[in-house]
Image: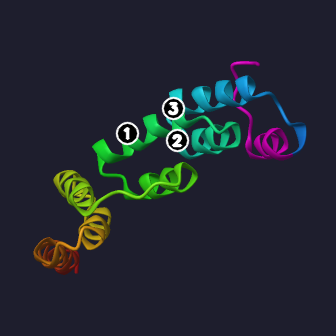
Amino acid sequence: MSKKLPNYQEKQHILYIKRPSEKDLIAYGDAFLEEGKISDAIDFYQKANYVQGLETIKGMAEQSGDVMLLQQVLKPLKQTIPGETWNTIGERALKVEKYIFALYAFEKGNNDAMVGRVKEIIKSEDNGKH
């Protein structure tokens, strides 16, 4: 495999037509992950059924409060996470000012107090922009 990552069309060909080996799929996933193209890495890890790679990304998403990536990786892992974990993710998202992610996480964690707090933050941010 070359060091150059495949473009969208090449990626689709590799994933759905070419049928590379599990080892090659994982190598592509690793290469995309190394370049910070996490969604692409998930696609390759999912196709390879590479749980370790998916778990790595899950941990990254939890640590960064990235709810979209977390949701994207939970699906192929066939996992759910408990409310207290959602609340922890919400706190992390709030800390880095990812308010929509924080809101979603607190909603999933059934944390009405924090949902209200984040809504107030979002409202005050919106008012400050007008």
Q: Position of residue 15 (x, y in %)?
A: 78, 42
Q: Position of residue 89 (x, y in %)?
A: 25, 54
Disc 2 marks which amino acid? Ile
Disc 1 marks which amino acid? Met
Looking at the image, do the residues carrying marks 2 and 1 touch, with CB atoms under 8 Å apart? Answer: yes
Q: In the image, what residue occupies the spot 69% across and 36% down?
A: 48
Q: Quadrant of residue 43?
A: top right
Q: Is residue 70 left or right of residue 94?
A: right
User: Which of pointers 3 and 2 indicates the residue nearer the eye?
Assistant: 3
Q: Quadrant of residue 127?
A: bottom left
User: Which of pointers 2 and 1 indicates the residue nearer the eye?
Assistant: 1
Q: In the image, what residue occupies the spot 64% across and 43% down?
A: 46
Residue 52, labelled with which disc?
3
Q: Which residue is mark 2?
A: 38
Q: Which residue is mark 1?
A: 60
Q: Quadrant of residue 105?
A: bottom left
Q: Nearer the viewer, residue 71 or 128?
A: 71
Magenta-drawn segment? 1-16
Crowd band around label 2 with a 10 angstrom C-alpha radius: few (<14), some (14–19), many (20+):
some
Q: Which part of the image, by quadrant, shows the N terminus?
A: top right
Vertical side of 21 occupied by 15: above or below: below
User: Does the magenta-highlighted stretch encompass residue 127?
Assistant: no
